Image (cartoon, rainbow, N blue to C red):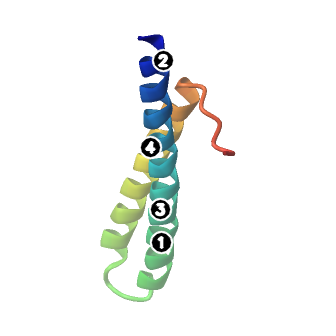
Amino acid sequence: MFGRRKKLKREYDERLIRLIKETHDEWMQAKEIERQASRFDDEGIARTQRLMAEARHFYLYKEARRRNISLKQ
């Protein structure tokens, strides 16, 4: 029974790490879009997208810290 629990925890931890990496990439991409959009009228939309991506990334990062997951795997 405990082996299954450890396996599930490991699977969810790996999934969380993958999500953190994906959201980091999305955040960096949104940051670049915002930088490019500053030349145009879409700056507000780009800033909102960047802030949402950043918030998602840091939420997942805090969850990983709460679970004591190392991101350097």
Which quadrant of the view contains residue 23?
A: bottom left
Work out which residue is located at the far bottom of the displayed protein and give it. Answer: 39
Q: Nearer the viewer, residue 42 or 8?
A: 8
Q: Amino acid at mark 4?
A: Arg
Give the Cα separation between the discs numbered 2 and 3: 36 Å
- Indicate the secondary structure of the residue bearing disc 4: helix
- Indicate the secondary structure of the residue bearing disc 1: helix
Q: Whole-percent x and y of residue 21?
A: 52, 55
**Residue lying at 41% horizontally and 82% vertically, measured from the top left:** 37
* Residue bearing the label numbered 1: 29
Q: Is residue 69 above or below residue 18?
A: above
- Circle 4 or circle 3, nearest the eye: 4
Q: Is residue 15 above or below residue 37?
A: above
Q: Amino acid at mark 2?
A: Gly
Work out which residue is located at the far top of the displayed protein and give it. Answer: 1
Q: For the residue carrying disc 3, how many other residues have a C-alpha within 10 Å: few (<14), some (14-19), or many (20+)?
A: many
Give the Cα separation between the discs numbered 2 and 1: 39 Å
Q: Amino acid at mark 3?
A: Trp
- Circle 2 or circle 1, nearest the eye: 2
Q: Any mark on residue 3, and which?
A: 2
Give the Cα separation between the discs numbered 1 and 3: 5 Å
**Residue lying at 37% horizontally and 88% vertically, measured from the top left:** 40
In terms of sequence position, does the residue under pointer 2 or pointer 1 come before the other?
2
Q: For the residue carrying disc 4, how many other residues have a C-alpha within 10 Å: few (<14), some (14-19), or many (20+)?
A: few
Q: Any mark on residue 27, and which?
A: 3
In terms of sequence position, does the residue under pointer 4 or pointer 3 come before the other?
4
Position of the C terminus, as image quadrant, is top right
- Indicate the secondary structure of the residue bearing disc 3: helix
Give the Cα separation between the discs numbered 4 and 3: 18 Å
Q: Any mark on residue 68, and which?
A: none
